[in-house]
Structures are given as C-alpha cells and as structure tokens.
Image (spheres, coloured by chain):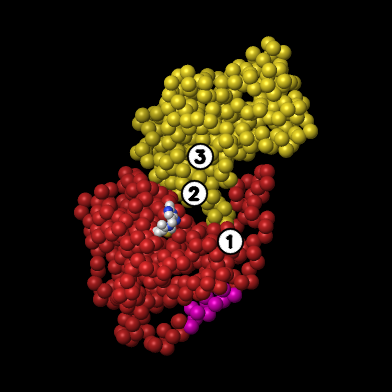
Amino acid sequence: MPSATTSPSKKNAATALPVDTRRRWLRDMLLIREFEVRTMQAYQNRKIGGFCHVYIGQEAVAVGCTAAVEHKDPIITAYRDHGHALARGMEPKYCMAEMYGRIGGCAKGKGGSMHMFDKRNNMFGGHGIVGAQTALGAGLAFATKYQDEVIDEKQNTRVTLCFLGDGALNQGIFHESMNLAGLLDLPVIYIVENNGYSMGTSISRGTTMGHEITAKAAGYGMDSAVIDGMDVLNVYEGMKPLVDRCRETSRPCFVDMRTYRFKGHSMSDPRKYRTKDEEKKYESDDPIDKLANAMISDNELSQEDYDAMVKEVRKEVRDAMKWSENSPEPDVSELYKDVYVDEWGPFTGTSLPEMLKD
Amino acid sequence: MSDAMREDKRVFLMGEEVAEYNGAYKVSRGMLDEFGPRRIIDTPISEGGFAGLGIGAAMHGLRPIIEFMSWSFSLVAADQILNNAPKMLYMSGGQFGCPIVFRGNNGAGGQLGSTHSWCVESLYSNVPGAKIAIPFDPYDAKGLLRTAILDPNPVFVLESERLLSIKGEVPEESYEIPFAEALIRRSGSDCTIVSFGRPLYFCLEAAEQLAKEGIDCEVIDGRTIRPLDIDTIVKSVRKTNYCVVVDQSWPFASVSSEIAAQVHMRCFDDLDNHVFRVNNDDVPAPYAYNLEQEMLPNARKIVEAVRAVTYNA
Ligand SMILES: Cc1ncc(C[n+]2csc(CCOP(=O)(O)OP(=O)(O)O)c2C)c(N)n1
Ligand SMILES: [Mg+2]
C-alpha cells in the first residue's frame, strides 16, 4: 500500500483558519510551555517526586492533534503526558496537584506525572510502560466502533488518537497492536512523536529504518504520513484529512510526527548524547515563536495582546501551583481505595477525584 | 458465556481460534453461529496485543471475555494483564475501571513439558487489583464464570484442560456463584484439606483412602483465591486442629504458603501441628509420564501429608 505523505504549505493553512482558532492554539501552547517550565522548577524544589518528563518543544503536536479531532474521540499517550492532558482540557491545577501527590490531583495523587487520566475529557491516560498504551489504543478504537456499530447499529463515529514515542517502535506490543488494528479495521491513528531520541539513544541507533519509519506502517497495510510537528498549523492541516478519512473508512493509519524535545529526557539528563548545535537548530524552530511571529507580522495579533496572553498564562499556572500547594495530601485511607470497585477484606471500594465531582 | 452475551451486548469473546475453529478446546462451540463474527472474534497469535485490546475496550465500557488458549501463553501478555488491567482503577484515581474476564486452561495438561504446564495462580495472586477463580466442576464453571463476567473488576478464571471432559449436572437457567464462598466438598472431623480446581479430585481420592485408615478428612474447595474465604478454612481448622494445603503451583511464595501463613496467624492456638503443604515439586514440569506424575500433587502425596500432620505416619 502506498503511503500518503502530507505536507501542506504553511501559507494555505495560515489563511484558511480563523484568527480566533489560531490565537487559542497559541495560548494552549503557551500554557503548556509555562506549565512545564514551572513543573521543572517545582521538581527542583522537590515539590514533585518520581520520574518527570516535560513536553517543552513538542507543544504543537498535542495542540494540533487534539484540534483535529472531536472531544468525544478518545486519546491515549505515554508518560510524557502533561501536554496532552492540558490540550485536552484538563485544568492545570488538577494536573499539577497530581504531581504534587495531593488529593486534588486528577488521580487523587495515585498516578503521578506519568499517569494523567481525565474521564470527562476522554483522556485515557498517560502510561508509564513504553509501548503498553498502543494495545490499549487499539482497544479504545475497538470499543467505540463496537458501541456504534454492534450495540447502536449505526456507523462508526469516533476516532482514537494513540500517541507513542519513537522508542516505542521497538516494543513488541506496538507491532502486535498495529497488526490487530489493521486486521480488525480499527479507527485508530498511531502518532509517533518522533523526537529523535529515546532517552540517550538516537533513533538511528535503536530502530531499523529509523530514517523512514513509515516503512513500519507499510508492513501492516496502513496509510501513513510524515508531518512536521514543529508547526501547529501544519500539524492540524496534516492531521485533519487523516482523521476524517479514518472516521469515514474506519481504517487505522500511522503518522511520523517530526518533533524535538528541547529539554532532557527526564529531570536528570545532562544530554551528552547530542550536540549543542543540534539543540540550537531546533530551538530556533520553536513552535510557539513561529506562530506568534507569524500572527504578529500579519497584524493578527499585537505585541501587547501577546504579552497579555503570556501574563495571563503565567497567572493561571501560578494559581494552579498555589491551589496544589493547598490541596491536602491524600488521606491514608486512600491506600485501600480504588484497588477493587467493590468492598471486600481491607479494600474500601472506589471514589472519584475532585475533578469529576463538580 | 452465551447467557451473558444474550443479555448484554457489551459482552464479546476474543481469542485464538475461538470462532471458526469453535475453540481450540471447543469451549466456544456454536457461539460464532449464534453471535456472529462481530462478537466472537478470532485473533492472531498475539496474546499481548489482544489482551491489551480487551483492556482498552473495557476502559471504554465494554465487557470483554478474553480467552487464552492456555494460561501458559499469558506470560507474553504479562505487562498487559498484570500492569494494565489490575492497576488501571488505582492509577486513574477511580476513573477507569477494567471489567474484563481472562480465561483459559491452567495447570499441567499432560506431558506438555515445562513451557506449557504453567500454574499461574501463585504468580498472579500476588497482584492486587485482580480476582482469581478456579472452577472444580461444570456447575462451578458456569456459575463462577457468570459471576466473573458480571464483576466490575478484572477476573482471571483458571480452567483446567484436564477437567474439560468432566461431566456434571448443570442447570439450564443462569446462576451466579458468589466469590469468596468456599465449599466443603467432603466433611470430616480429623484433618482439613484445602485446595482449588483439579487437585481437589486427588484430595477427595486421598480422603477416601484415609477414611479406610480411620482418618476422617474435611476437603474444602476455596473456589476463589482472591478473594479468599479464609473464614471457612479457619472454622474447619478450629474443628479438626490439623491442616494440609494442596496447591498445584510451585511451593516458594505460593498460594499454599499464603494460606499456611494465614492459618498459622488465625489458628495458632487451635493447631496441633504446623500446616503441611503439598505442591508441585520445586522443579520445572518434566515431560516423561512418570516424572510428571511424581512432580504433581497426587493422591499419594496428599495421603502421606495427612498421615504426617496427624502424627499417623
Ligand atoms: C518497558 C519499558 N522499558 C524501559 C522504560 C524506561 N524508559 C522510560 S522512557 C524511555 C525512552 C522512551 O523514548 P521514546 O519512546 O522515544 O519517548 P520520549 O521520551 O522521546 O517521549 C525509557 C527507555 C520504560 N518506561 N518502560
Ligand atoms: Mg523519543
């Protein structure tokens, strides 16, 4: 099967979309950036524990992809998941409080940085085991299709976005999931956030055909696309037709989303495996600057508007941190909650997080 | 399974050879004809993939039944069934439960060698978040499976290839067997024998033999390992003052060691000897018939254990 490579011209994209939409995306990206900068600080101040992976540099991917689908469409990703949660509409305070290990967190402080879940926003998790979510993504797509077609006896209406890192390409479960998705005609889009590295291993050192990973999709009879993930308009324009086609035909597809993480893999990574020149090159391709500059130079956004936006976002994140700080630690009784739905032995049933209560 | 599928369209069956082949062991015979290929779904040999697919589907509100041709093959799906299914509810802070049934054959099947002779109950019962049921006969197989399908948690149903040919009375109508309700398969007053699934047949055989020697055994079928009905076991041990646990998995850190520990804690003053255990020998399952028979918990070993624990050796 041939692979359809999509790379729309930026000019077209920029003019086709309403200014308000682009402003919103800019703001969403700014929010994620600010959130992650503060996350790093909070981590250094030991407010956040465990492993923590920030999304700085990749903001355009989560924002552009979620914009290309509908709210009812499930999304699922790996552990670098704060950006997806925020792009999907989780309030920053629930995301931050989760990392603070507080009861106000989206998972009551039981999941942490790598495990952001938001039922109301159809965000089916960040997942800590590399590749594990690819099978769950197939299952989400199976379920939406089954619910629409077998239970409701209508046409499939939903598409699942399943994000993975380039490192996950080398996990067996990814290949099993691709095969099942192809065989069972599952409406799922596998989006590889190809930032070139899995921890310190560059894709060329870890993955055969690393220079052309769409070859993997061809092996499973799937259409694929290569999309420049450093430009949110491009991400949206590239994703939209894929999403539409997936919804219509219920066929899976595969995206090589080219991106770059500006920071280390996690909070303890001196980045010895790549050069400063390489980092500089990508930093000059910052997806936020790119959109902001374009809008300002096209007179769609004034410098004052932009500054106000930055300020607003800063306040939002600061408030989220304050809120998290004030949210209590989970009561010890939470230990035995949510192990089983029902109550038996020492287990005390289940209860929803604050986020879903109001 | 068919009853549940007739009542609830969210239930589907997926696994290797479940549809067109009618089940590798014919468990799903006729189901494809009744429910069609959208609900009885053949998969490739891809345990990790279809186990994970089932979990994702359960997170989104379906009620999957995932068949492993053998629980031995579930090991390649370990990350999905041990990490994802049982921990989703906890990790998501109560947001996403995982109502799913994994079922298939467990235990030494008969000269299949080590890779195919897994008894996963000790490994898997170490994991909080899952439930584990082990049917003894056709009546229990139907009732426990129905309870498993209706349960909002992940349930592992460990069936036995060697018991698939056992015949027994099964009511037409559907019924549930509640979890954590052990059943006394034989009552007696001299020694308590606790077991699950296939080894219970050896326990009953041993009990008959011991009865002739004047040792009257009470044989308890635990039915579910998680949740475990320890109360029924404790009550029996308080009566008999002796206890033997028979467990078809390996002895180290096993179901039998857990039950022994709990009985020691709860019945310290009632016991007239420490708890004895009969397990698989602590070796990989061999192929040769005589070696395999010797390695499994058999009636002879159980008889010897009961004699020893009751000071009749
Ligand atoms: C099964 C498994 N093996 C190893 C790890 C440790 N680990 C965490 S992230 C990571 C690198 C993954 O890189 P990639 O998939 O490219 O995602 P990125 O970090 O670039 O977003 C590794 C090896 C893990 N979490 N899970
Ligand atoms: Mg990567």
Residue A97 x %, y %? 57, 67
Marks 2 and 1 belong to one chain: no
Q: Report which residue position mark 1 lands on.
A: A109
User: Mark 3 or 2 closer to N-term?
Assistant: 2
**Residue B201: which quarter of the image?**
top right
Q: Report which residue position mark 2 lands on.
A: B84
For the residue pair A216 and A251, the one nearer the viewer reads as A216
Numbered label attached to residue B101: 3
Q: Amino acid at mark 2?
A: Asn
Residue A122 x %, y %? 47, 59
Describe the element under mark 1 as helix, strand or loop: loop
- Measured in 3D between alpha carbons, the distance from the residue under mark 3 to the one under mark 1, in whole angstroms, is 28 Å
Q: Amino acid at mark 1?
A: Gly
Chain A tint as drawn? red
Letter of the chain in yellow: B
Q: Main secondary structure of the magenta part?
A: helix
Q: Quadrant of the C terminus of chain B?
A: top right
Magenta highlight on residue A315 = yes
Q: Which residues are magenta?
A: A311-322
Q: Residue at x 40, y 29 (%)?
A: B23
Give the chain letter at badge 2: B
- Counting other residues with Cα less than 10 Å from the Cα at mark 1, is it few (<14), some (14-19), or many (20 or more)? many
**Residues at discs 3 and 1 in contact (Cβ within 8 Å):** no
For the residue pair B170 and B313, the one nearer the viewer reads as B313
In this rendering, the answer to whether B243 lies above or below A12 is: above
**Residue B20: which quarter of the image?**
top left
Residue A67 x %, y %? 38, 67
- Counting other residues with Cα less than 10 Å from the Cα at mark 3, is it few (<14), some (14-19), or many (20 or more)? many
Marks 3 and 1 belong to one chain: no
Give the chain letter at badge 3: B
